[in-house]
Amino acid sequence: MNYEEAMKYMHKAQKRGSILGLGPVKMLLAQLGNPQEKLKVIHVAGTNGKGSICTFLEAMYRREGKKVGRYIYPTLHCYLERFQINGEYMKEEAFAECLTKAAHAVSRMKEAGEELPTAFEIETAVAFLYFLKETVEIVILETGMGGREDATNVVSKPVCTVFASIGMDHMQFLGDSIEKIAFEKAGIMKEGCPAVSYPNTPEVLRVLERQAGLYNVRLDEVKRDDVHIISETLNESVFCYKGTEYRIRMLGKYQIYNAATAIETKLFLDGHLIKESLMDAKWEGRFEKVSEHPLFIRDGAHNADGALALKESIQKHFTNRKILYIIGVLRDKEYDKMMEILCPMAVKVFTVTPENERGLSASILRESILPYCKEVTVCTSVENAVEQAKREYERYEKAGQKPVIVAWGSLSYIGQING
């Protein structure tokens, strides 16, 4: 099939929805010769920060001249952004070729009366086929949701499993307590394969340590006391980890701990790294300055922990500034809690409806914001919100005040924000 036919095939597969469980994806990969078992994989799970940790790891390996594969979800710009090698998106021809192989395998499953894989499971198989075909030297693989029953949890011997910050999200699928969610994330551990953890809460670490014991896993935990922050600006952060100084461009205190987790992983696996490589790391939509004038930040804070991290960054960098928000969220998130955390800081908010089947109506979002900020405008589009926010920015600036625009919420709309 060609690319157009391939996308029609995927659109049809998406109608099967999202189903947790590994039976169909394992059968699909077996039909394809288990390409995932022929790759060197670092597997990363977590609630917040797993994409950032993957980005730091990718930068370190690329600076050493390695060919690095990344499988990313969700994406900011386009569909083929999901499949990357050294930062370059998969070409349409390559996607069509790999999907054709996967589609033939799905047809064989259908003929045998087997349960068919979901779109995400098919995409996961396509990623493994692509990385094997292109002979990547290492795959940095992040889970989609959870871990234990996530479609990416099919590599029997990853070189390492890594745990980012674990918090409350996707409770309808993963459980209603932090311990239950941590248990699901810990499901990516494999017998005898080492693991590294972000400085998670004691409740999370107890679960990870218990599961590590069951799987004979050596678990390295990044400790906050080993991280000493020297400075944070809107251009870079400087910190020491275990006595060595590092610099990163990715902003926010949480990115310092994400970087420390990536550093610990690299040193644990290889014993060395080029510390300057951390400055190469860029992860769009994570407390990212997209323009200087107007001063415009975009951040993919899409759950309560993400909102708390964004609040900390705003308080750190924008004291005494007038905060203007653009917000769009998904309706299955704890949006009321996120509004409670962040909206008391705003002087005005512009709401949008993300172009996603799960997108929350901008009008409903407005009602959630009003208890914390009385100036809320429902916008017809992201472009309209940006235009109105810029006009408001100019009004405050002319009055001699220091405004900043912060667009935050679902990554499904953040990619449309360019300052």
Image: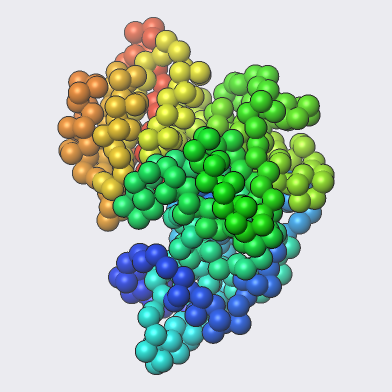
Left or right placement of residue 353 versus residue 300 in this view: left
Rendered view: 229 above or below 338:
above
Rendered view: 32 above or below 288:
below
- Taking depth in this image into account, of 304 and 246 the one nearest to the observer is 304
Q: Position of residue 185 (x, y in %)?
A: 50, 52
Residue 21 in view of the camera: yes
Rendered view: 48 above or below 3:
above
Rendered view: 3 above or below 88:
below
Left or right placement of residue 61 versus residue 127 in this view: right
- In the picture, the quarter occupied by the C terminus is top left
Please tell me in which quadrant of the rendered image residue 409 appears: top left
- Taking depth in this image into account, of 83 and 221 the one nearest to the observer is 221
Q: Position of residue 255 (x, y in %)?
A: 58, 34
- Taking depth in this image into account, of 176 and 35 the one nearest to the observer is 176
Give the residue displayed 32% in from the left and 67% down from the top: 17
Q: Position of residue 341 (x, y in %)?
A: 34, 26
Give the residue displayed 66% in from the left and 47% down from the top: 219
Residue 417 in view of the camera: no
Q: Position of residue 354 (x, y in %)?
A: 30, 46
Please tell me in which quadrant of the rendered image residue 243 appears: top right
